[in-house]
Amino acid sequence: MTEIHYNATGRRKTSVARVTLMPGNGQIIVNKQPVDIYFPRETLRMIIRQPIEIAGLTGKYNISAKVTGGGLSGQAGAVRHGIARAIVDMNSDLRLRLKKEGFLTRDPREKERKKYGQKGARKRFQFSKR
């Protein structure tokens, strides 16, 4: 018997998460580590669990995620995006609910590049008239 699983890709900033959703007891594994160990801050773990709670699937599915690039915040956002996409792949009736919460929209904000002749992307060097 083949086990049913749903795959999806989530992205945020420079992070990419490959998420697999399969029937289970609610375990979340990120890069072969439990979510509590991989994401030390409670806010990041809360971000990841949001789509599961809104869909009402808490404790029904195991989630495995491989995430690369970026920092912890971007990675948590990427995993959330991937979980939401996998849930829609599994049950398209939940799409409207997840879309309304904004979990299916890829956050387009990226870091702005530094410009030449300036200190940063927007900050300038101090102007001196004399």
Image: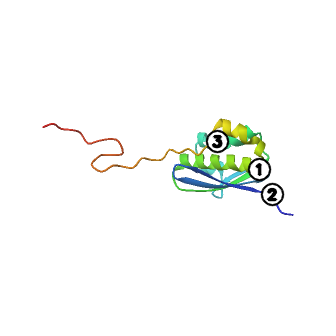
Q: Residue at x 24, y 39 (%)?
A: 126
Q: Is residue 11 left or right of residue 98?
A: left
Provide the secondary structure element on which disc 1 rests.
helix
Tag 2 near tag 1, CB within 8 Å: no
Q: Secondary structure at mark 3?
A: loop
Q: Position of residue 19 (x, y in %)?
A: 67, 54
Q: Is residue 81 visible?
A: yes
Q: Residue at x 72, y 37 (%)?
A: 97
Residue visible at 65% across and 58% down? 32
Q: Residue at x 59, y 39 (%)?
A: 43
In the depicted view, which residue is nearer to us: 39 or 9?
9
Say what amino acid the circle numbered 1 marks.
Answer: Met
Sequence order check: which comes first, mark 2 or mark 1?
Answer: 2
Please give the label number shown on residue 4: 2
**Cα gap from disc 2 to disc 3, whole angstroms:** 23 Å
Crowd class of label 2 (few under 14; some 14 to 19; many from 20; radius 10 Å): few
Looking at the picture, the colour scheme in use is rainbow
Q: Residue lying furthest left in this view?
A: 130
Mark found first going from the N terminus, 2 or 3: 2
Instruction: Give the residue at the far bottom of this rendering.
Output: 1
- What residue does disc 3 label? 103
**On screen, 129 above or below 6?**
above
The mark nearer the N terminus, 3 or 1, is 1
- The crowding category of the residue bearing disc 3, from other C-alpha atoms within 10 Å (few below 14, some 14 to 19, many at least 20), is many
Q: In the image, residue 130 lies at what x, y percent?
A: 12, 37
Q: Answer yes or no: do the residues labelled 2 and 3 have beta carbons within 8 Å?
A: no
Q: Quadrant of residue 101?
A: top right
> Residue 125 in the image: x percent, y percent?
26, 42
Q: Does residue 116 appear to the left or right of 89 in the view shown?
A: left
Question: Quarter of the image containing the N terminus?
Answer: bottom right
The residue beneath circle 1 is 90
Name which residue type carries label 3: Phe
